[in-house]
Image (cartoon, coloured by chain):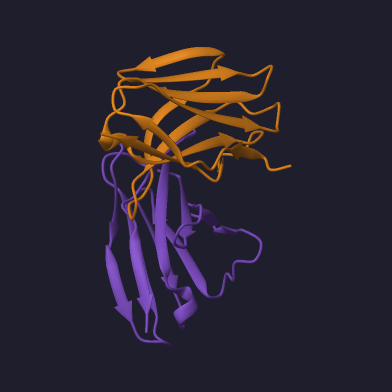
Chain colours: A purple, B orange
Amino acid sequence: GAVVSQHPSWVICKSGTSVKIECRSLDFQATTMFWYRQFPKQSLMLMATSNEGSKATYEQGVEKDKFLINHASLTLSTLTVTSAHPEDSSFYICSATIAYEQYFGPGTRLTVT
Amino acid sequence: QKEVEQNSGPLSVPEGAIASLNCTYSDRGSQSFFWYRQYSGKSPELIMFIYSNGDKEDGRFTAQLNKASQYVSLLIRDSQPSDSATYLCAVNIGSARQLTFGSGTQLTVLP
């Protein structure tokens, strides 16, 4: 149980385009999901908390107009990176919660050229 | 002071030995504690969680929690080369559902 999927697993896009990443809880419902970013050899950085049916809560320094989060159902949250730039290239990971336990998706590696 | 602190390592142990990973946290009100394993290039995988003082065992893994001293540890018995990874300690700070992660300890098990 507690399987979280992400799609796509990797994506290459051109600077200025937008990319959507999906996060799904496959065998449970998650009212709360989290989005993280991780640069090479660095720890996880929480970007935002995604709550089903309400607006996401963004961490300080994360541009909410650039990283659009939609949690449309109890099993799906999406992160859209708008007008991507090379500095947005990173490993994006979502997690879904059961009580206080967080289960991570496999991650999406984004490369912006 | 960081909210969750771990020794960054690297920590090297020979195959078959016990690996001991330590973590301290600053908020006495924290209630939930987690250990994640992260292989290079992969996402974190939950391996243990502990909520009460004392020891919790799962296979070769034992989590130990001491709320009075504000530390949580992970012991890996009979370490295998496949245990080589970065181990992340995570804590619910206060009543928040989000986790605060330590910077991770890199473990290498030498064959």
Query: On screen, B13 above or below A12?
Result: above
Q: Could you tell me residue B21's position as x and y percent?
A: 49, 29
Q: Position of residue B20 (x, y in %)?
A: 46, 25
Quadrant of the image containing the N terminus of chain A: top left
Q: Is A86 positioned to the left or the right of B58 in the image?
A: right
Q: Residue furthest top?
A: B54
Say which quarter of the image contains residue A13: bottom left
Residue projecting furthest to the right: B1
| Quarter of the rendering containing residue A9 | bottom left
Q: Mark yes or no: residue B97 visible.
A: yes
Horizontal relation, residue A108 to residue A67: left or right: left
- Vertical comparison of B28 with A91: above or below: above
Q: Quadrant of the C terminus of chain A?
A: bottom left
Residue nearest the observer in this picture, A113 or A5: A113
Vertical order, B48 against A110 (above or below): above
| Residue at (67, 33) in percent of width and height | B94
Q: Depth check: give the residue in front, A18 or A108.
A: A108
| Rendered residue at 30%/18% (across/down) | B59
Going 34% across and 20% down the picture, which residue do you hit? B77
Q: Which percent across, then down, holds residue A44?
A: 50, 53
- Does residue B94 appear left or right of residue B103 in this picture? right
Is any part of residue A84 visible from this angle? no
Q: How many marks?
A: 0
Q: Position of residue A51 (x, y in %)?
A: 50, 51
